[in-house]
Amino acid sequence: TLPYHWLELSTLLLEAASDDIPSADHVRRLLRDLREVRMAKMRAGVEVLEGGREVKMNGVGGMEVSEGRAFIGGVVDGLRKLGVGREISRREREGEEEALGTGGEGENEDDMEY
């Protein structure tokens, strides 16, 4: 498990003391690769939002949360708009059915009152 601020600390260390770190360029590449893999994993985790399930974000670092916030917020907003669009379509359909007199009276036994 990486520390919460692993990306920030590594960036600061590489900026301030790159001469003291053996193979600093290689370490930078490895950190960039690690960051890309972790972000891809986080994006994949967000895909479960479409199913209405929760997303577990265990082990996500501070900078990753910050970077992913805009992406995740966009996904959530998009899903919310889709839900609103479906609700509006459903209401319009029900309104048309009521206006035409096909509004389902007697069509569904579950709706009947005894």
Image (cartoon, rainbow, N blue to C red):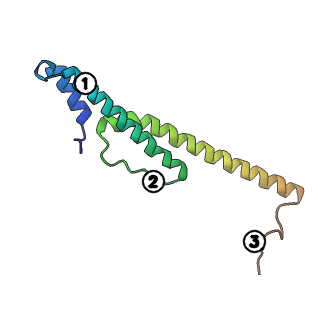
Left or right of 83 in this view: 8:
left
Q: Which residue is mark 1?
A: 28
Q: Residues within 10 Å of mark 3 (few under 14, many from 20)?
A: few
The residue at 19%/22% (across/down) is 24
- The answer to whether residue 33 is above or below residue 56 is above
Determine the residue located farthest toward the top in the rendered image.
19
Q: Report the amino acid beneath label 1.
A: Arg
- Looking at the figure, which quarter contains the N terminus? top left
Q: Which mark is residue 54?
A: 2
- Looking at the picture, tell me which residue is in the foreground, 34 or 83: 34
Percent of width and height locating residue 74: 50, 37
* C-alpha span from label 3 to label 1: 64 Å
Earlier-in-chain disc, 1 versus 2? 1
Residue 20, picture quadrant: top left
Left or right of 57 in this view: 10:
left
Q: Mark 1 falls on what kind of element? A: helix
Q: Which residue is mark 3?
A: 111
